[in-house]
Amino acid sequence: MTEKGINQFDQKQQNTWLVKKHLYLNSPISRVEIAHNLGLTTPVITGIITPLLAEGVVRERETREADSSTGAGRRRVMLEFNPESHYACGVDLGPYYTNYVLTDLCGKPVAQRQTSRTLDEYGTTIQQLSRQIPDFLAECGVAQEKVLGVGIAMPGLINGSEGKVYTTFKEGWTQRDPAAELQQRIGIPVMVENNVRAKVIGAEMFDRMVHAQPFAYLSVFYGIACQMIIDNKVLYGSSAAAGEIGHMVVQRGGPFCVTCGNRGCLEALSGERAVLTRCREIMALEPGCLLWKLCSAPEDLTIDMVLQAQNLGDDYVGDVMQDALDYLGIALANVVNLLSPSMVVIDGRMFALQRNQNYLLRAAERNMFRVQAHKVQFTFLPYDPYRGARAGAAVVIKHYLHEG
């Protein structure tokens, strides 16, 4: 009897999560449609939706559709989440800036802010966040009781369910619990998640991009990672290291990676830091190259300047970018060959140039199992500096829908 009770409770929790998620991703939608799509009874749907209506989290909306038999309009009651019922704050601890976003319950940005890059050292960063987060929320003018929480997206091996950092290149973060410490300081629930894994959740919850699985999200910035959704679950692996293809060795004895300490890994050959390093070496060897017209000193070089030089036809930069994309294409082909995803979303500033998109896909196809080549949908995302912060908010909202 005890086991049966536990199973019934688990089933109810599972049904509640399925209904809320289905409503969130497909609203406006009727009770009958939810029941049909999920194979549940209408009374079960009503039992789950009624308290959400009472709380104002979900609302009803009447629509009319033509009735072919009478020619009159037929009233339908549709359900949707009330976007103004709650809000979520997202923070992206990026390599260049720290970005803040406040979204409504449906993921629409309400306010955003960009500040100078947060220092890597743990204590200093926690102090800075404990000041800036409340300041940002106060500026937004939203009542604190309406804020579900703060989601922090950052690089590293992170267990999002626990909020603990297993390891990261940032000083003093390893085996720390920044979520608990920040929550104690600011009085608002805090979640911490790997930045690319958070973007996968953002693509699923806010952008409605996950239509078939497996689903892969390739992020190419300072670091490189490919996070995945398989069987409706974001893949973590046993040590939260799933998807870290940036540290897959693709050139034996290649350049040293300052993040992982290996040689010849993908990040050391194709990441933004690797591209900038090679371009700075070109500036040192070629005083007359185009990069000097765009940048007064190698240490001030940015990836946007590199792309500008490439777009203006600089051969040196073109060769650097092609080398980076060749290795990236090999890694992308390996991901496709291994997982056979239905869709790969590609996010990175270097793909602002169409030629880089085209070259990457050609490089991948050269190394891809032929059966896979035309069965995968590749989608390049436009660069959005606030995507990581918005993804942090998505982590909060998904947790709210799942846990209540």
Image: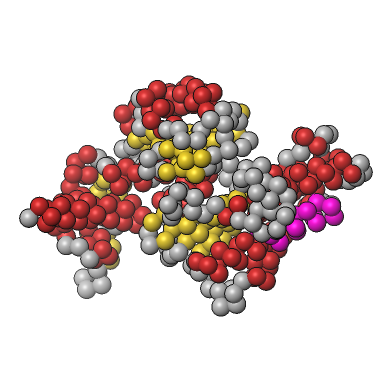
Q: Which residues are magenta?
A: 315-328
x 37%, y 43%: residue? 161
In which quadrant will I find the N terminus? bottom left
In the foreground, 24 or 74: 24
Magenta highlight on residue 355: no
- SS assignment for the magenta stretch, majority: helix
x 44%, y 58%: residue? 229
Q: How is the image coloured?
A: secondary structure
Q: Is residue 117 left or right of residue 8?
A: right
In which quadrant will I find the C terminus? top left
In the foreground, 29 or 68: 29
In the foreground, 256 or 284: 256
Report if residue 253 is visible in the image.
yes
In the foreground, 118 or 162: 162
Q: Write down the quadrant of residue 345 in the picture.
A: bottom right
Whole-percent x, y for residue 190 in the image? 39, 33
Whole-percent x, y for residue 208 in the image? 43, 55
x 65%, y 53%: residue? 265
